[in-house]
Amino acid sequence: MSRPADGGTAVGKRSLTVAGHRTSISLEDAFWTGLRDIAAARASTVAGLVAEIDRRRGPANLSSAIRVFVLDHFRAATEP
């Protein structure tokens, strides 16, 4: 995962269609980058990956669920 020049702390808001409706999601740039990297590795779109996270998230808000998903993905990739 490439790291944005600002360390990934700037927050970016993106609009996506998830489960048939438009929604806006605010995430730090580092999480958007990680989400794009994961989607590309899975030959998916960011919107498709977010829809998958949305279906599994339970009571968590979507932005938090995405952050945890990205963190878990890269944490698992570094485990022996």
Image (tube, helix red, strand yellow):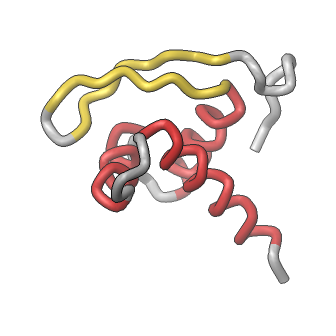
Comparing 38 with 25, the one in front is 25
Instruction: Assign the N terminus to one quadrant of the image.
Output: top right
Depicted 12 relative to depicted 21: above or below? above
Q: Which quadrant of the structure image shows residue 14?
A: top left
Q: Which quadrant of the structure image shows residue 5?
A: top right
Drawn side of residue 77 relative to residue 40, left or right: right
Instruction: Report x, y in % for residue 74.
Output: 71, 59
Comparing 66 with 64, the one in front is 64
Instruction: Assign the C terminus to one quadrant of the image.
Output: bottom right
Comparing 19 with 43, the one in front is 19
**In percent of the image, x 25 and y 37: which residue is there?**
18
Q: Which residue lies furthest to the bottom in this view?
A: 80
Instruction: Report x, y in % for residue 30.
Output: 71, 32
**In percent of the image, x 43 and y 25: which residue is there?**
25
**In percent of the image, x 49 and y 49: which residue is there?**
65
Drawn side of residue 18 relative to residue 78, left or right: left
Image label count: 0
Instruction: Report x, y in % for residue 62.
Output: 41, 40
Depicted 44 relative to depicted 62: above or below? below
Drawn side of residue 80 relative to residue 73, left or right: right
Depicted 33 relative to depicted 35: above or below? above
Instruction: Report x, y in % for residue 40.
Output: 52, 48
**In percent of the image, x 86 and y 26: which residue is there?**
7
